[in-house]
Structure formats: C-alpha cells, structure tokens
Amino acid sequence: MKVEKMEQELKEKIDFQKVPGHVAVIMDGNGRWAVERGLPRHEGHRQGVETVREVVRCANELGIKIITMFAFSTENWRRPAWEVNYLMSLPEKYFQTELPELIRENVKVNLLGDSSRLPGKVKKAVDEGTEATRNNTGMILNFALNYGGRSEILLAVNRMLQDAREGKIKGKVNEKDFNRYLYTSELPDPDLLIRTSGEKRISNFLLWQLAYSELWFTEVYWPDFSKVHLMEAVYDYQLRKRRFGKV
Ligand code: V0D
C-alpha cells in the first residue's frame, strides 16, 4: 500500500483527544542499517538525524506534548574513537539545520544527562540550541545525551544525601520527593516507550520513569522509522488503553 494511504488510514483511526502526552524513544539500529547496505556506520547515524527531524515533525502534528530521544548513553563511550567523534559532531549539525524550524514551531529543546563531561564544543552547541529555544512554549524535545538510568538514580541519591546533611530533609522521602532530584523533575513520566531495531530491552534508559509506561517494539531500524511507524505506535497505545479501561 502507498505510504500516503497508510498515513491517511492511521490518521482516521487515531483519537487525537487521547494521544500519549510523553513519548520516549530508543533510536536503535543505525549501524546495522548502514552495514547491511554496505555503507560505513556513520552513514546510518547521518540518516538517523533525518529520521529525528521527521519524527519530531510528526509528533508535533499529532499533538504529543513531550518527546524524549535516547541519543547517546554513558556506555556508548566504549565505541571506537572515530565513531564517538562522529556522533559528537551531530548535535551541532542538528541545530545548524533544524534550529530555524524548531523556533518557528515553538519547540523547546532540553538535555537529559551529564553535560559537564561532554567535549567543550558539544556542550557549547547544546547550550546554544537549548538557550535559543528556552522560552518556547510548544512541544518539549528532550535529548538524552551521556545519559544512564542507574547513574541518574545515584546522582539523585547523592544530591539528596547532601541536602539531608544540610538539614534540608526532615524524616522519610517519598516518590514525589525523589522525583525532584532526577533530570526529569519537571516532566511527567513517559506514557509510551518506542524501541526500534528488534531489541526488547530498556538498556538503562529512564529506569525510574518507565515504571508504568506502555512498551512498543518494532523490527524496523531507526533510519527506516517513519511517520507511519510513529502513528502505528500511538494507535496501538490507544488500543491498549481502551482495553484496560473496560476491565
Ligand atoms: C545518532 C540516531 C540528534 C541515534 C539519531 C551525541 C544516534 C542521530 C542529536 C542531538 C544522534 C543531541 C543533542 C542535542 C541535539 C541533537 C544526536 C547524538 C547522536 C549523540 F541537543 N541526533 N543525534 N546526538 N544520532
């Protein structure tokens, strides 16, 4: 079937009053996509940025309020230096091409992760991009960069211990108190997690926040992921919610 027709059919099935408010995405399979085509791995990452653009546009059209994309994990430093170097050039490239549209579309870009340990030029690019969209009030676009779920939790625990030593914490802490110490303190938990490329794991992404999220997996590699797949995921999410509501 033609893509336009599939998009149209999905658009008619989706209940625009009940789209997931926060969608998290593990963008997996860029390297494999390239290697299967006889291309160098970085071609997969380059194509992956194109997919980010299309998915951000589509999420905005669907009325998704927050989208959080796993761009680089704390474990990814173990990759070959040339690949890490290439990946580290992407935030700057991304903002060079996308910033005008992000501003026009009123999208606010945020970073989740330890940005203090990023190379200077990456931190600068990210700071400029987030600063330029700081006052935007539309969709929130989070990039998890140098992010790990367990380190996020440990960072939260250690910051909490510091506050306790300073006498700022009285008695026991609850989930709501703990939430204030996470990178996502200002955000609701994801309603839906999408992972591409056939892997069915969380891989240290948003460990605390994904506790109650719906999980949606596809065999499709990230560079081949498109509007149709995002709409399928949203539609499937709505089917699950409807079934759940009936019990
Ligand atoms: C490669 C597929 C956007 C996944 C998408 C540093 C891996 C393309 C960004 C980005 C990457 C990050 C921060 C920011 C703006 C954009 C990005 C990396 C990799 C690793 F503020 N895509 N992207 N960052 N890929």
Image (cartoon, rainbow, N blue to C red):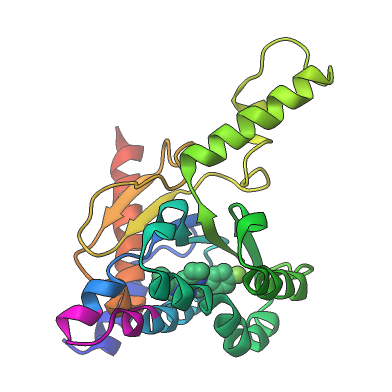
Does residue 170 appear left or right of residue 7 in this picture? Answer: right
Q: Is residue 37 magenta?
A: yes
Main SS category, magenta section: helix
Residue located at (43% from left, 48% from top)? 205
Measured along the vertical axis of the image, is residue 7 above or below residue 247?
below
- The number of callouts visible is 0
Position of residue 84 relative to residue 236, above or below, is below
Query: Where 79 falls versus 240 (above or below)?
Result: below
| Residue 10 visible (yes or no) | yes
- In the rendered structure, the answer to whether residue 35 lies left or right of residue 130 reads left
Image quadrant where residue 216 sits: bottom left
Q: Residue furthest front?
A: 81
Image location of residue 131, percent across then percent down: 76, 70
Q: Residue at x 70, y 69 (%)?
A: 130
Q: Quadrant of the N terminus?
A: bottom left
Q: Position of residue 101 (x, y in %)?
A: 62, 86
In the image, the segment drawn in magenta is 34-45
